[in-house]
Image (cartoon, grey):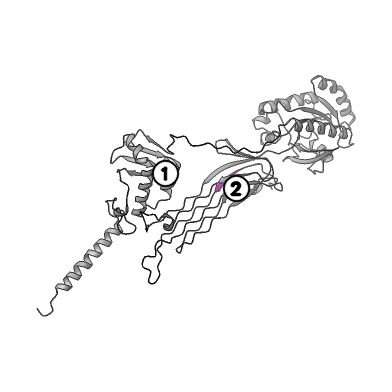
Amino acid sequence: MTTFVDRVELHAAAGNGGHGCASVHREKFKPLGGPDGGNGGRGGDVILVVDQSVTTLLDYHHSPHRKATNGQPGEGGNRSGKDGKDLILPVPDGTVVLDKQGNVLADLVGHGTSFVAGQGGRGGLGNAALASARRKAPGFALLGEPGESRDVVMELKTVADVALVGYPSAGKSSLISVLSAAKPKIADYPFTTLVPNLGVVTAGSTVYTIADVPGLIPGASQGKGLGLEFLRHVERCSVLVHVLDTATLESDRDPLSDLDVIEEELKQYGGLDDRPRVVVLNKIDIPDGHDLAEMVRSDLEARGYRVFEASAVSRTGLKELSFALAGIVAEARAAKPKEEATRIVIRPKAVDDAGFTVVREEDGLYRVRGEKPERWVRQTDFNNDEAVGYLADRLSRLGVEEKLMKAGARAGDGVAIGPEENAVVFDWEPTVMAGAEMLGRRGEDHRLEAPRPAAQRRRDRDAERDEAERAYDDFDPFQ
């Protein structure tokens, strides 16, 4: 059964905003109570937060679909809907969030670091909030915005100061088990370690973490063995420790060739050339291993490596190795630039930035893109004529109609607002700003000449009733 997962795809869906309410206050002896529709609640966000108690992405491997709660709709009596609850997802320290194309969205390092994977939708305004001097009793409300849905990839990169790398069965797990309190699985066959192990080492006044990376083999950087899956766990380390097996039973291997193979794989993976290297000649408790270590030590030192002879069984050389690694880690920490408080960068909008763009496409369609126009379209109830008229007023005030004219649009040309997958397309008709004199009964706008089917049926019923009343008035029972 899988107990460790370091790469998952998460399908995050934020909550939808609640719809606003269109309501009129009704009370005895108060015929003109005015609008009292409340606003809709905000949808909940999906937030990734670093939690030190979490060490794997296993939960998201089994249930990758996560959704926050929706906001509640507004109600009459100026009662606003309840906001949706944010969905907090704990992730391990060192989690990198990427989009489907591999672009880094966030690098979550440090307890409490957070990233909003899905933004909740805004709640729609009720007609009480939409009332103005020109529109005293709106017969409509704004719809809630849909929450953001996003697919992200989460990769875990172990946050460790020291990384042990080497061939399978080189003794990495044995070393970490005696250097720290970690209890990895240890056996006498290759690929015993299937997941990275992390331990804490104390050497004098220095405390550092050490990671045991599953064994590498030739071609690991291209996906052979387990290397490609776990090479990412050495990216954050300060020191690379080559654990070389001096007592291997394979005739075609020796410490020098093993070192060359692992270094080539690290070079192919990339990004690790600046890390200091330390070589540990392991298993010197075996006589042949001790003799081989003495033979290759001078060659390794000639290459510029610091060499240590060690044995996890007899505990030989472990103290010297531990304090040497502590010194290198301390130097690396001192060389890091001091963290500065995050600066608040204010970028004022350019004076010529209208907040939207109008582009004429090859098929003659004019496409409007911008945060405000697209949000307004999502919040508009197109079954309500007055709401559509309100949208037209807002677009006109923003300058959309003026830009359409400058772009060459004429009455009857097709206009699309939003991206292709969910755009609203209509035949453009230049409009004028609407005042109170342009509005008829609640929910209607006289600028829309095409009658709604419901409105037409209502007018037909009224005409039939009037005709029946006239016929009744003209009826004379004595004739």
Look at the image and give the residue range highlighted in magenta: 4-16
Q: Secondary structure at mark 2?
A: strand
In the image, residue 341 lies in the stretch drawn in magenta = no
Quadrant the C terminus occupies: bottom left
- Give the vertical position of 338 relative to 79 (above or below): above
Kind of residue sitting beneath label 1: Pro
- Report which quarter residue 169 is drawn in: top right
Relative side of 225 to 100, left or right: right
Q: Position of residue 105 (x, y in %)?
A: 58, 38
Q: Position of residue 46 (x, y in %)?
A: 57, 49
Residue hosting label 1: 373
- Give the vertical position of 392 relative to 352 (above or below): below
Q: Which is closer to the viewer, label 1 or label 2? A: 1
- Report which quarter residue 77 is drawn in: bottom left
Task: Identify the residue at the far left of this view.
Answer: 479
Residue hosting label 2: 47
Q: Secondary structure at mark 1?
A: helix
Mark 1 surroundings: few (<14), some (14-19) or many (≥20) residues within 10 A: many
Q: Residue at x 76, y 26 (%)?
A: 259
Relative side of 291 to 212, left or right: right
Q: Residue at x 45, y 35 (%)?
A: 351
In the image, residue 9 lies in the stretch drawn in magenta = yes
